[in-house]
Amino acid sequence: MTGTQSRDISQDGVEKPEQIATPADAAAIAARTAGGALVGNGALSGQLSYRGLAGERVLGRVNGQRFASGGPNAMDPPLHYAPSVLVERIEVARGVAPVSQGPSLAGAVNARLAEAEFTDEARFSAQGRFSAQYRSVDDSYAVGGLAGIASDQWRFGLIASREQGSDYDFPGGTAGGTSFERNLYGAHAGFRSGPGEIFVEYRRSETDPTGNPPFALDIVYFNTDFVQAGFRGEVADGVHLDMRLGHVAVRHLMDNQTTRAPAAPPMQARATFAEADTNTAEVALRFGSDGSYFAIGGDAELTDKFVRITNPANPAFFIDAQPDVKSERVGAFAQWRGALSAIEFELGTRIDRTDQTAGIPALGSAVPMGPRGLAAAFAASDRDYSTTTIDAVARFWIPAGDVTPRVTLARKERVPSLLERFGWLPTEASFGLADGNIYVGNLALDPETAWIAEIGFDWETDAVTLRPTIFYRGVDGFIQGTPVDDTVGVIDSPIEMIAAMNGDTTPLRFSNVDAELYGADLDFVIRPVDRIELSGTASLVRGKRRDIDDDLYRVAPANLRLAAAWTGDRLSLGAEMIAAASQDNVSRSNDEQPSDGYVVFGLFGRLAVNELLALEAGVENLFNAEYQPHLAGRSRVGISDVPTGERLPGAGQGGWVSISARF
């Protein structure tokens, strides 16, 4: 055995970019990683697509805490709860998440919010951070910050943010229904004795009326409370303990009356109430150092969800679309990092036991017979499901001076979500696909199983950083929507009848198919001369069905991001280009439409007034290009300059300015 590197080869950190206006949605920051793309579903509801996979296949956390989305259509994916103005950094697993992070099929992302830090002195000293931004294209502002005090043993902090924006402009007019409003506030504390820390934190996130044009309903509110506490640190020489308990409570209302224009008529008025409670417990014991260790641990995640659809104009109309659905997962893992001669490695495996159940749906007296029949059939079915999943990851690399070759092999599994399994009522709920299709769940779903291989290298010198990767991911039992029966378009079943009444004669059922995704991506930094830096990412992924001749649904096209910057002692200036190819490899079985390529330019600058204060400004979409990202949702808003059914366009030309300070 030999010594190992201490750096974490399995994880990247994404800082808030200086090149662009900081988006309200932190998913847009995470999407700047190599292999990343943004699924645009509104100002605060974006998702990270990573190497062609999105939704619950990408593990999302905030401050290391796992939790379930409250919205049945993922209006609040995990990064919804990480206002960019408070984000310190975003951690993205490189390709495959270590088993110690929990089950995850496609990768993992974790947003770290600003917090008070311990000092080296016994006396208390004040700490503070403040950020503010104005953006002209949507007349939006964001303000947020941290105020704290800390010593070498104690730390206390308060965080708060406020964001608000109007409908954004694009070259063809204004995208109606895209305004947003969100507040967040919280407190945290820590006590350190020797090498260990006891910590506790609480946050309250309040999203007020916010438009979601790709969905049938808009956000009225998300009121969400986060609590977690634990211990981290050494309990003996070379023995590190991490343990934490957490609870997240989401309370949500969405409707087509508050912000939707025009509001739906009384017969079609809908208000959906949703709740999600997540309790988590984690413990991990590591023997050794950061660069060479053996770790074991366990975790539990208990989720309770409830969704009721109502008509605010008719109290007798209500349907429990997700009646007390529950998921209880308990898992354990072992992970070993070490070296054999020149080869360093990280080996891990985990096993998880998941139990899922659903209650009996209640329906109001005004609900017609079609849904009543489906509810009765669901109540009579077996609504208990249990399964055991096994993950394994083997990562190898050879530090060889400036170049580090690396290889990863993995087997990952994902248990079907509660919506995919227990969605008995045909609705548009699809965890954010926002494609206008009506979906129904499937009690017979099996877990997805991914077989993954990656190969690449890291080349790092003073002048160049280059990190390309080639990857392949075969997924057995991939879950996606397929026709509910063999007679597509023929309305001969209760599901199709209900779907047809709601405007979709070809509803889809979540089903297991076989798929594969392969491609390449890289990130790079080039410093040709002093003070000049070129940086960027490039990504290419192809997704295909293996059971039929078709492409996978909603896979991002090839894309390139390139920034050039000149850095002075206090002043920095630069430009950025974002380009995407056309996407013609689309799913015929899901009636996916191709998209055109585009190129967008921006300018940016930064002035460091002193070590504590900085001003930033820029112009986005410099040439006012009109474009529609392939993964953008399609507008459902009637009063908008975006035609109904068209992909949401990118923001038009606009200026932005921001200020940041810390002490």
Image (tube, helix red, strand yellow):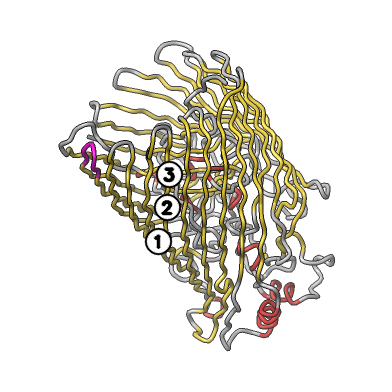
Q: Quadrant of residue 662?
A: top left
Disc 1 to disc 3, C-alpha distance: 25 Å
Say whether disc 1 or disc 3 marks the residue closer to the N-terminus. 1
Sequence order check: which comes first, mark 2 or mark 3? 2
Task: Give me the disc on residue 242.
Answer: 3
Residue bearing the label numbered 2? 81
Q: CA distance from mark 2 to mark 1?
A: 9 Å
Q: Mark 3 is on which residue type?
A: Asp
* Residue on which disc 1 sits: 224
Name the kind of residue labelled 1 in the image.
Thr
State whether residue 37 appears in this view. yes
- Dot 2, crowdedness within 10 Å: few (<14), some or many (≥20)? many
Percent x, y of residue 504: 70, 68
Write the residue at 36% across / 49% down: 140
Mark 3, other Cα within 10 Å: few <14 / some 14–19 / many ≥20 = some
Between circles 1 and 3, the one closer to the viewer is 3
Residue at figure coordinates x 81%, y 75% from the top left: 492
Q: Position of residue 58 (x, y in %)?
A: 57, 47
